[in-house]
Image: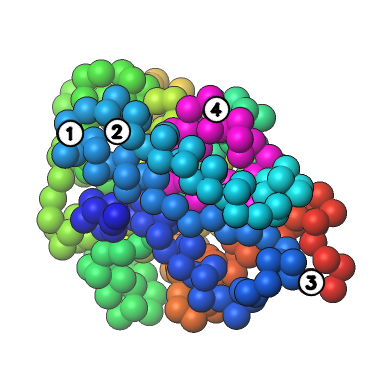
Amino acid sequence: MRTHFHMNDPGYGIEWVIPELFATSPLRVSNPEEANVFVVPHLMVAYFHYYMFHKGSKNAADEAANPYFAGLMSYIRHAGPWFDRHEGRDHVFVFAHDCGACMLNGTNIAAVRNSIFLMNMGSLTTGAESLCFNRTKDVIVPPVQLSSDFLDFRKDTLRPDLSTRRNLAHFRGTVWDDLAYSGGVRQALKKLFLETRPGDFLFNEGFADPATYLKELRDSYFCLHPPGWLPCKWSGRFINLLFSGCIPTLLMDDLVFPLEEIIEYDSFSVRIAEADVHNDRWLDILRLVPETVRQTKLQAVWDTTFRFSYNVPTRSGDAFSSILELVARRLRAQGLLRAQQ
């Protein structure tokens, strides 16, 4: 069950893309006794969204998705001894929900508490060592860029053109009054824009067609990446900012970003504390970034996009090969990776 929404959103796409890459990998073996790791494909988020959009209720979606996952776990445990052999430590699950594995109920999360989770985000506000996310065993993976507008632009452009950048900073997106949405960060951006109308900050509330959105990003140096719903803070815009050739400007505290343990984020992005958004200092911080640093970061953005790309076949250094490397690290740390692997 893949819904249109599920297949075309960059965050939710990992639920089907990553298992298929594992399934078609030359590393796959047919004999489970030879396997180092067991990847469990499932469509829990697709199931969740189907019920949420067709039944109109998040509660109905939760009540449908969690029994689905419980049934999956029952099947796995009855199919053979492999899950229980190492208490699930050599099993991998992809959780593409905004809150990752936190979409599981207590019984389900306890059943897979030792397994490796691949997720879009790692929120430390839900507990650094919580059952939903443990940065020592779980892997935060890149969203999947599925938009042809962004992929075609990235393919056809060799390096950033600084001459067309008219805006210092850019934001387009949803801004609601409810502070549970972004914790007041998006609201503070809107307030600053409406009250001061800074000429170097392009702010647009709501959505635009992909071509318009891409043009806005390409016209800007720093593209703002504020939180979404609390406490998870997930927002899928990161991959769009990166593939547009704009400098991702991360306005989120206590969040682990994709592949952060092996990619140097400071080379291609800027981090600004949420407190500096609330006190309106963020724009002055960006104005103080020298032109030479902007150019260096823009080139680094271009050079880094490959690390966040999923390719068929997989290429050394791309997103999937990095995921394989990090999963192997987790297995090795627990003594579950054969010495020759």
Q: How far apart are marks 1 and 4 (CA)?
A: 24 Å
Looking at the rendered structure, which numbered label has been put on residue 61? 2
Whether tag 2 and tag 4 are in contact, CB under 8 A, the answer is: no
Sequence-first tag of 3 and 4: 4
Q: Which residue corresponds to the image point at 29% horizontal and 33% vertical from the top-left?
A: 61
- Circle nearer the N terminus (2, 1): 1
Taking the view exactly as shown, the residue that stands out farthest to the front is 78
Label 3 close to label 2 by CB (< 8 Å): no
Alpha carbon distance from label 2 to label 1: 8 Å
The answer for how far apart the CA atoms under marks 3 and 1 are is 47 Å
* Separation of residues labelled 3 and 4 (CA atoms): 34 Å
**In contact (CB < 8 Å): disc 2 and disc 1:** yes
Q: Which residue is drawn at 58% across and 58% down?
A: 39
Q: Disc 3 or disc 2, which is closer to the eye? A: 2
**Res. 218 image quadrant:** bottom left
Residue 119 in the image: x percent, y percent? Answer: 50, 47
Q: Which of 105 and 320 is in front in this view?
A: 105
Camera-side residue of 120 and 2: 2
Q: Residue 55 carries which label?
A: 1
Residue that label 4 marks: 107
Which segment is the magenta one?
90-119
Of marks 3 and 1, the one in the foreground: 1
Instruction: Identify the image quadrant of residue 231.
Output: top left
Circles 3 and 1: CB atoms closer than 8 Å: no
Amino acid type, callout 2: Ala
Where does residue 329 sit, x and y in percent of width and height? 74, 57
Residue 13 visible from this viewpoint: yes
**Which of the marked residues, 1 or 4, is nearer the chain's N terminus?**
1
Taking depth in this image into account, of 232 and 237 the one nearest to the observer is: 232
Element under label 1? helix
Q: What amino acid is labelled 4 in the image?
A: Thr
**Are there few (<14), some (14-19), or many (20+) residues within 10 Å of tag 1?**
few
